Amino acid sequence: MAHVETLIVGAGLAGLRALYALGQKGITATVLEASDEIGGVWNHNRYPGARCDVESFDYSYSFSEELEQEWRWTERYPTQPEILRYINHVADRFDLRKDIVLNTRVEEAAYDEDRAIWTVTAADGRTRTANVLMLCLGQLSAPKIPSYPGQDTFAGKLIISAIWPKEKIDFTGKRVGIIGTGSSGMQMTPVIAETAAHLTVFQRTANYSLPAANAPLSDEEVAQVKANYAARREQIRNSPSGLGFRPGKVKTLEVSDEDREAALEKSYHRLGFGFALTFPDILLNEEANAVASDFLKRKMAERVSDPELKKKLVPSDHGFGTRRPSVDGGYFEAFARDNVSLADIREHPIVEFTPEGIRTEEKLHELDIVIFATGFDAITGALLKPRIVGRGGQTLAEKWADGPLTHLGLATAGFPNLVMVAGPGSPSVLSNVIVSIEEQADWYAQMLATMKAEGTVEFETTETAEQGWTDYVQVRARETLYGTADSFYNGGEVAGKPRVFMPYSGGVRHYRLKLIECADAHYAGFEQRTAPLARSTDVAANG
């Protein structure tokens, strides 16, 4: 049975970054990856039009100046193939592949209380042990797969956007249906519309979207960023969202109508998600949010010519940013094409699949291909897929039955020597996630190195610490408008999931200060033991 100091589950951006950070501290680690390739979500989300909604310069690792200088991004917002090339380049550039085991899906991880060891069992029956288990499974990586009546009878092809086939899908002459209008659905719609005989978009909830304002990067732009990368990174680390810009101090309604309109217009054409930071209170104050929402509704309506379509495509049941908005490249304009139509499944729900297509309460839509762009069981979904067994035989699913409990989004009581990257209780999906990944990976590496040097064999967060942080996450969330809509932030998009706000909304900079505070207090909130609790009472408590 192979043993290593740390087993990392997941070879996406988080897993690779954690592997590098641990190696820099002399901690041996192995990454277990279910797929036959590295890359995580950027390996699986190969759908047409797949593109990051964070600028390429910022959606990249900051740990190596040489890497920053040698890699040349080609577009402002990178496509899936380019991001995957970058990830593979990093793995090769820093010799990470030797410690990655592919085609190894973790089914169970169980903690041995007597030995302070995790035993991890893969789908192929092989087991491995480690002192520490690190979960790098992603926040948007467990797809929601619908199950409609008659779905198995459909004679055409079913595709899940988040598990897109590697072979090229030819839409030429095909009747295509897309179910879902989140980021994936909005990105693929204009691309598929170019070749499909007909495209039907099945919409349950209209979504806010801003133009991506994507463009090729000139040599001059690239040179300018590379000459000032250090300052750019520092600005990002000290911004609320990790996007590199901070809102001004003047609130939405404290400026004239003309100045407010000019500011919103400028942000609309350039900042993507950053539109929410045009003024500091857009996500905090209902009146301010209404102003921003109305501006975006006008902008979206301008992109749709048909009056009836305007009513359906422009959101009316939630404020901007309370659900995750999208950035798109021609989504609304695609509906002006003769071969694109909208099926409003809130007004006329899907009744069943038939061999010919999808029957709604209104009509039968005859289709050759159906794409489920139905999103993810976000933030906790991937963490709860394996059976993770902690102290006393309790599973993580049982521990989190009423919602996730973590200390700083790092660990949960009853599961010693287990940590998670960008999990619930951290900024995760409310941030440029790669910034959050790097902060946590480096923090973990230093913590594990410190504890190893001090002879710690078992560390475990306390119930007091995790409850305190979980309560604080809710306090910060209530300062915002996030609770006014059902979203994947609060479990509202998965039937039966606890309705709890999961990410930390206090911002990247403030979260980093909390991490520093914890480390400076010798990892406050963690009990550190020189022998397993089952065999010793020699405990250094930092609750």
Image: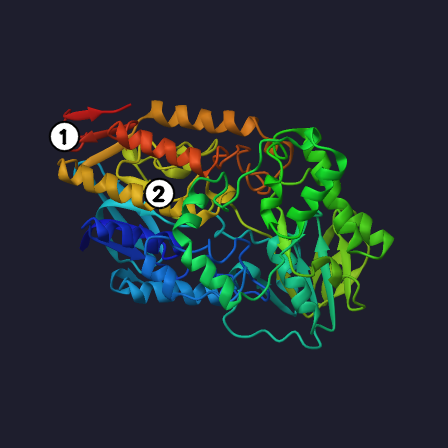
Can the viewer see residue 40?
no
Residue identifier under label 1: 535
Viewer-nearest of discs 1 and 2: 2
Which percent across, then down, holds residue 30? 25, 55
Q: Is residue 362 left or right of residue 212?
A: right
- Which quadrant would residue 452 be assigned to in this image? top left
- Which quadrant would residue 320 be assigned to in this image? top right
Instruction: Relative to 337, say whether 318 is above or below.
Output: above
Q: In what element is the residue under mark 2?
A: helix
- Residue at left offset 62%, top offset 56%: 212
Q: Is residue 112 left or right of residue 432?
A: left
- Sort mark 1 into few (<14), some (14-19) or many (20+) by Cα contacts within 10 Å: few
Which color mode does the image show?
rainbow
Which percent across, then down, holds residue 2? 19, 56
Nearest to the observer: residue 528 or residue 65: 65
Which percent across, then down, holds residue 255? 70, 32
The amino acid type found where label 2 is placed reads Gln
Residue identifier under label 2: 440
Q: Is residue 439 left or right of residue 235?
A: left
- Quadrant of the snapshot with the N terminus: bottom left
